[in-house]
Image (spheres, helix red, strand yellow):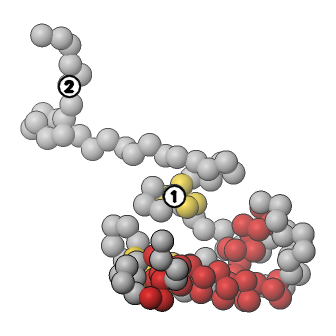
Amino acid sequence: MGNRASSGNAHGDAAASPQPVSYNVYNQPIDPSNQMPLTPNQLPWPGQQKLLSTDRATSTIPKGGGGQWVFPSPQMFYNALMRKGKGADVTEDDMDSVIMVHNGAATCVWSRCHAPASDPSRGAQA
């Protein structure tokens, strides 16, 4: 027989092994349940002129493992745009509209993707 590392304790119970921590390209720890930053950034972006809402809406889209997906807050979305260099022409005043379009589009796409194939509202059939 080959050597095997001993696992467990004196009672034969398996020892709990720590889960490896993954990081994104911004060196933020990632939540393995949704692949998003473990601690959402709800702080104002450096140089931000107006405070944005940190309220998040719960969607009707089911989340893997149970529950519903939670949409980003206007502040989280703004921070993501700025962090990715996509916010040069975005103002804080734009964010409520951006969030409304983002959340509405995601909900619409999800519901259409999961509508029965016979549902004519799904669009053109192949």
Badge 2, how many Cα within 10 Å: few under 14, some, many 20+? Answer: few
The quarter of the displayed image where residue 120 is located:
bottom left
Q: Which residue occupies the foreground of this view, 94 or 124?
A: 124
What residue appears at the point 21 percent right and 31 percent down from the top-left corner?
A: 7
> In the displayed structure, does residue 91 sit left or right of residue 4?
right
What residue appears at the point 14 percent right and 41 percent down from the top-left corner?
A: 13
> In the displayed structure, does residue 7 sit left or right of residue 71?
left
Please say whether residue 52 is visible from this viewpoint.
Answer: no
Depicted 42 relative to depicted 2: above or below: below
Mark nearer the N terminus (1 vs 2): 2
What residue appears at the point 71 percent right and 78 percent down from the top-left corner?
A: 75
Q: Which residue is mark 1?
A: 35
Indicate which disc residue 6 carries. Answer: 2
User: Mark 1 is on which residue type?
Assistant: Gln
Q: CA distance from mark 1 to mark 2?
A: 32 Å
Label 1 secondary element? loop
Q: Which residue occupies the foreground of this view, 14 or 112?
A: 112
At which x and y percent is residue 55? 61, 86
Callouts 1 and 2 close, C-beta under 8 Å: no
Q: Nearer the viewer, mark 1 or mark 2?
A: 1
Depicted 12 relative to depicted 123: above or below: above
Depicted 32 relative to depicted 54: above or below: above
The number of numbered discs placed on residues in the rendered structure image is 2
Badge 1, how many Cα within 10 Å: few under 14, some, many 20+? Answer: few
What residue appears at the point 20 percent right and 19 percent down from the top-left corner?
A: 4
Please say whether residue 121 is visible from this viewpoint.
Answer: yes
Label 2 secondary element? loop
At which x and y percent is residue 83? 77, 61
> In the displayed structure, does residue 24 sit left or right of residue 62?
right
User: Mark 2 is on which residue type?
Assistant: Ser
At which x and y percent is residue 1? 12, 10
